[in-house]
Amino acid sequence: MRELYKDLDIVAVIKKKSSEWIGNVARMDNERLVKKIFESKPGGRRRKRRPGLRWVEDVEEDLLEMKIKGWRQKTMERE
């Protein structure tokens, strides 16, 4: 079993799966709870400090490193 995983770059696998999942969420119907949460902008005030990265921003950065631009449009053009 160890031999199966020894050559996998776990970071690359996670980035690939994240980019696949973000595409699935982007194509979901707007009434789905996952889509609503994904697109929501929480209101209220936050403490004064540097805001942390959202998961989406982290995945978008990974996509840019892979030279993928306009990912939202590309997910909608999928056959």
Image (tube, rainbow, N blue to C red):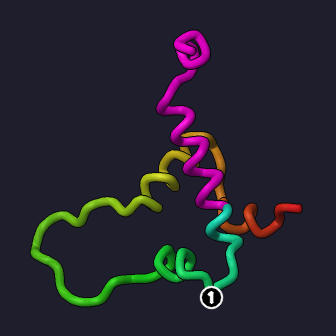
Location of the C terminus (image quadrant): bottom right
> Which residue lies at the image location 33% right of the left edge and 59% below the top edge?
53
Q: Is residue 2 magenta?
A: yes
For the point 23% across and 89% down, which residue is it? 44
On whether residue 25 falls in the magenta region, the answer is no
Local packing at callout 1 (Cα closer than 10 Å; few below 14, some 14-19, many 20+) is few
From the viewer's side, name the closer residue of 23 and 72.
23
Q: Amino acid at mark 1?
A: Glu
Q: Is residue 15 left or right of residue 67?
A: left
Q: Position of residue 40 (x, y in %)?
A: 44, 82
At x 61% / y 16%, what residue is drawn? 4
Residue 21: x %, y % from top left = 61, 56
Circle 1 is placed at which residue position?
31
Please state if 6 lies on the left or on the right of 27 as rendered: left
Write down the region rendered in magenta: 1-23
Please give left or right for residue 53 compared with residue 7 in the image.
left
